[in-house]
Amino acid sequence: NFMLTQPHSVSESPGKTVTISCTGSSGSIASNYVQWYQQRPGSAPTTVIYEDNQRPSGVPDRFSGSIDSSSNSASLTISGLKTEDEADYYCQSYDSSRHYVFGTGTKVTVL
Amino acid sequence: EVQLVESGGGLIQPGGSLRLSCAASGFTVSSNYMSWVRQAPGKGLEWVSVIYSGGSTYYADSVKGRFTISRDNSKNTLYLQMNSLRAEDTAVYYCVGSEGWFDPWGQGTLVTVSS
């Protein structure tokens, strides 16, 4: 079964930059779009990146997404880290049956 | 304003059945792909099922044969019929628009399967 693996947690100081990876277990991660969701405690997830690198309206340009085919990974980068960015982040793509697959999730801590 | 409101969650014994509902406003259920996504306590997100605008339905292997997704176009409401419930089905269940990416999300409804 296709899986997306993320680091369990990352932490950094305010104003710094963090990058979260999302590695596909098989196939080419570039063959399907990757989305990224932010989930704050007690709340439903919200979209921060869709279609690999697109930001929904209202999401600051501190959030950016990219694809690296050489490592079969997608990445979410948060620059100028703020305390409000402290949350869980999930990547999402599709398997060969076009079923939705979520990544394992990464907890971002702003020190 | 777009709003998805889930209901129907609660405490149910193993082997029991439950039907979740998701009432939509400002958003047409029948015109969009609609999914159920769940999250077990302290765990990550898991896609459960989708119904396409054309009516085709698909399920995660973990619920196939036990859960049924459906919709009532006249009520603009999405449903999830859950049968033969197991302890591992305990989770918050979210109703989500899923055309392209997951948006919008409901607030979720908690299902607890326990004796």
Image: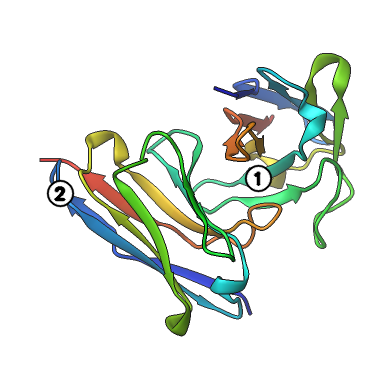
Farthest residue, direction top: A71
Circles 2 and 1 on the same chain: no
> Can residue A11 be seen from the camera position used here?
yes
Residue on which the image places disc 2:
B16
Which of the image's four quarters has the C terminus of chain A?
A: top right
Which residue occupies the foreground of this view, A55 or B23? Answer: B23
Q: Which colour scheme is used?
A: rainbow
Which residue occupies the foreground of this view, B15 or A27? Answer: A27
What is the secondary structure assignment of the residue under circle 1?
strand
Relative to residue A26, is residue B103 depicted above or below?
below
Bin the neighbour count of mark 2 within 10 Å (Cα to Cα): few under 14, some 14-19, many 20 and up. some
Relative to residue B43, is residue A57 depicted above or below?
below
In the picture, measured across the screen, residue A93 lies left or right of residue B106, that is: right
Q: Mark 2 lies on which chain?
A: B
Q: Quadrant of residue A11?
A: top right
The spot of residue B90 in percent (x, y) is: 30, 41
> Can residue A91 be seen from the camera position used here?
no
The residue at 62%/66% (across/down) is B32
In the rendered structure, which amino acid carries the disc numbered 1? Gln
In the rendered structure, which amino acid carries the disc numbered 2? Gly
The spot of residue A89 in percent (x, y) is: 65, 37
Q: In which quarter of the image is residue B99?
A: bottom right
The residue at 79%/19% (across/down) is A72
The spot of residue A66 in percent (x, y) is: 87, 33
Q: Residue A38 carries which label?
A: 1
The residue at 84%/52% (across/down) is A55
In the picture, measured across the screen, residue B52 lies left or right of residue B92, that is: right
